[in-house]
């Protein structure tokens, strides 16, 4: 677990949010909440955070309020991560100075993030050709027509395409924000932030958006009960057949419901959750890798190494070196 009452760290990574005319205040609030608040329980600020705007007074969406007393657009030139502006009317082009700031950030290797309609801003800046993005599903056709060189994925919560990350509808900004915190600081810190937000940290980018589907029946909703039970018993040798028996359905039906509701197979879901548990155990630093493999249910260190390399790109030893709290 993160150590409490430790000395505040000096944030080395600078996150800058560009706020422009008609920007959505919710996504700005999400960015501020995830990246901009002091977290004494984690040793202080996680990031050096700043808002900036191209004008001294910026009217937010529908004129709800105006934003003042933030940095000018030159602040974007010092960002390690730049969050680009969005707005509900995607047909109105962004001003040139905003797009120029995004291009400069991209050229010098900054990480770019677009929440909701922010994908349109990134595409207007010309940094998305050949890349994968997402935004709210209602804009899928419009985006594809305007930017055919970009792969638009409407059935996911967020897309991590390396140095460019995009989130779907407004609430998915929190999912992506927590994903970024996990990349930068590890699973334990991300989980701590999610607890402060009273928000589920386990919605990964592959989970489907709600695309005009009927409310699931009680039987289908039983997947929540099954997954919660599995999460509490990951150290045990649970199989897909075990999950199906507990749900009182066939393996084929279980597979179909997992794919429909979680966009993954039961087997892949179990492996991913075991890797997540293993990562948390490694970060705490009080177990050797044999014990981590046993406690997370993967069995052997060989299997742990295979699964962790597939899911995180790192071996258990490399992950411990990078993220362990001890």
Image: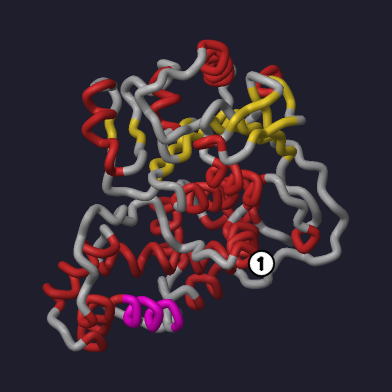
Give percent across and percent down for residue 168. 39, 44
So how many labels did they put on this image? Answer: 1
Q: Say if the magenta span includes residue 228.
A: yes
> Which scheme is used to colour this image of the protein?
secondary structure
Disc 1 target residue: 284
**Residue placed furthest toward the front:** 63
Give percent across and percent down for residue 298. 41, 71
Horizontal side, residue 221 vs residue 294: left or right: left
Q: Can residue 312 be seen at all in this image of the molecule? A: no
Pick whichever, 47 or 174, lies toward us: 174
- Point 13% across, 74% down: residue: 253
Task: Classify 10 Å Cα crowding around label 1: few (below 14), some (14-19), many (20 and above).
Answer: some
Q: Which quadrant: the N terminus?
A: bottom right
- Point 42% across, 60% down: residue: 203
Q: State the predominant SS element of the stretch in magenta.
A: helix
Q: Which quadrant: the C terminus?
A: bottom right
Q: Quadrant of residue 18?
A: top right
Look at the numbered disc 1 and give the secondary structure of its residue.
helix
Q: Can residue 48 be seen at all in this image of the molecule? A: yes
Horizontal side, residue 110 vs residue 152: left or right: right
Span shown in magenta: 224-232
Q: Quadrant of residue 190?
A: bottom right
- Point 28% across, 76% down: residue: 223
């Amino acid at each position: 677990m993160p150590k409490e009452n430790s000395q505040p760290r000096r944030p080395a990574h600078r996150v800058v949010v560009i706020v422009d005319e008609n920007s959505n205040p919710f996504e700005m609030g999400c960015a501020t909440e995830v990246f901009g608040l002091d977290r004494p329980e984690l040793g202080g600020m996680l990031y050096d955070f700043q808002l900036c705007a191209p004008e001294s007074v910026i009217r937010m969406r529908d004129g709800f309020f105006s934003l003042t007393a933030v940095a000018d657009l030159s602040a974007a030139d010092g960002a390690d991560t730049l969050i680009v502006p969005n707005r509900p009317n995607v047909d109105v082009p962004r001003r040139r100075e905003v797009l120029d700031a995004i291009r400069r950030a991209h050229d010098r290797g900054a990480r770019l993030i677009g929440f909701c309609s922010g994908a349109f801003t990134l595409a207007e800046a010309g940094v998305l050709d050949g890349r994968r993005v997402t935004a709210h599903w209602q804009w899928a056709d419009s985006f594809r027509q305007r930017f055919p060189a970009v792969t638009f994925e409407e059935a996911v919560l967020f897309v991590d395409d390396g140095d460019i990350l995009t989130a779907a509808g407004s609430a998915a900004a929190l999912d992506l924000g927590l994903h970024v915190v996990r990349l930068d600081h590890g699973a334990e810190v991300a989980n701590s932030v999610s607890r402060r937000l009273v928000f589920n940290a386990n919605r990964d980018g592959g989970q489907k958006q709600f695309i005009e589907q009927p409310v699931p029946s009680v039987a289908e909703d039983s997947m929540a009960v099954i997954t919660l039970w599995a999460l509490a018993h990951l150290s045990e040798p649970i199989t897909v057949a075990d999950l199906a028996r507990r749900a009182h359905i066939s393996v084929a039906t279980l597979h179909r419901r997992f794919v429909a509701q979680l966009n993954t197979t039961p087997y892949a879901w179990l492996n991913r959750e075991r890797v997540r548990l293993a990562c948390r155990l490694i970060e705490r630093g009080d177990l050797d890798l044999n014990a981590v493999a046993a406690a997370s249910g993967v069995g052997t260190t060989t299997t742990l190494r295979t699964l962790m390399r597939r899911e995180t790109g790192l071996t258990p030893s490399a992950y411990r070196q990078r993220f362990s709290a001890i």
